[in-house]
């Protein structure tokens, strides 16, 4: 049972345009959401997070939006850069548990 | 501040053997989690240790086990290896000391295990 889903395995975006990565979850107990970026041969690195008390969190070119009623979150990267090419994982956790549940990842390719 | 260190980086084992992977968390971090990454499956949670106690466990068979030492270093053991155990095993540490899940985890580079 995949509690966190990233239905797009890959995304290709032109440099300078917006990249939108989507994530859906099924467990209504999740109240903290994170995005990680992973380059080949490296471990995932934390990118940005959002608590369920917010619906938006922004950090530079990265913005995460949370729609609790739809159990959906998205990561916007504006403007996209070639260095953003990586696999992006969304993850979720809930109060009372310390484990992160990850999605299957979306491979983003930013081309010139 | 040193990051999360996993050893070895690469490992090749034969079916039926057992393997032990090691993880040294960031200094001061007491929570260590282990994940298995395979193509198309994302990062599957194995287990999490905090202060030498297993706090959470994923849906993996009993062949997968772990432990944590008093210095927070953790080991993961897989016995009777199967071909399907070939994966990247990632360790993550966090400073989370309580029950709130609002803490980001920091990952090591992983151990690439190949079972032949």
Image (cartoon, coloured by chain):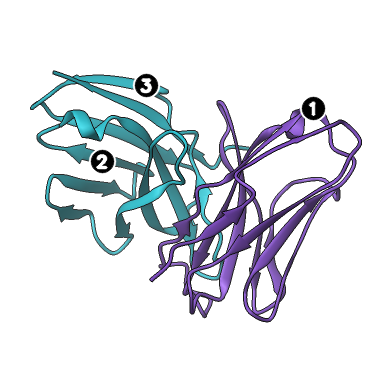
Chain ID of residue with mark 1: B
| Left or right: B70 in relation to A27 | right
Instruction: Please name the residue that numbered disc 3 is placed on.
Output: A10
Which is closer to the viewer, label 1 or label 2?
A: 1
Chain that is cyan in the image: A
Does residue A111 lie above or below B63 as drawn? above
Whole-Å distance between the Cαs marked 1 and 2?
35 Å
List x then y, in percent, for residue A81.
15, 31
List x then y, in percent, for residue B91.
57, 55
Chain that is purple in the image: B
Tell me what residue is drawn at x 67 percent, y 65 percent. Answer: B74
Quadrant housing the C terminus of chain A: top left
Whole-Å distance between the Cαs marked 3 and 2?
14 Å
Instruction: Please name the residue that numbered disc 1 is placed on.
Output: B83
Tags 1 and 3 both on a single chain? no
Instruction: Please name the residue that numbered disc 2 is placed on.
Output: A75
Circle 2 SS class:
strand
Q: Which mark is drawn over residue B24?
A: none
């Amino acid at each position: 049972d995949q509690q966190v889903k990233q239905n797009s395995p890959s995304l290709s975006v032109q440099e300078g345009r917006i990249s939108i990565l989507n994530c859906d979850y099924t467990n209504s107990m999740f109240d903290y959401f994170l995005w990680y970026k992973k380059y080949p041969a490296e471990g995932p690195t934390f990118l940005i997070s959002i608590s369920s008390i917010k619906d938006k969190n922004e950090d530079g070119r990265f913005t995460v939006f949370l729609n609790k009623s739809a159990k959906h979150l998205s990561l916007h990267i504006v403007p996209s850069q070639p260095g953003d090419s990586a696999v992006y994982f969304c993850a979720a956790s809930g109060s009372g548990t310390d484990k992160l549940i990850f999605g299957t990842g979306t491979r983003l390719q930013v081309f010139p | 501040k040193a990051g999360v260190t996993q050893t070895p980086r690469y490992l090749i084992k034969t079916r039926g053997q057992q393997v032990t992977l090691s993880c040294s968390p960031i200094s001061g971090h007491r929570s260590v989690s282990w994940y298995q990454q395979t193509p198309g499956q994302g990062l599957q949670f194995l287990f999490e240790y905090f202060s030498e106690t297993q706090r959470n466990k994923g849906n993996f068979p009993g062949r997968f086990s772990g432990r944590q030492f008093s210095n927070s270093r953790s080991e993961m053991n897989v016995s009777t290896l199967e071909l399907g155990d070939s994966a990247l095993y990632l360790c993550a540490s966090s400073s989370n000391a309580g029950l709130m899940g609002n803490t980001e985890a920091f990952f090591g580079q992983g151990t690439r295990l190949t079972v032949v």
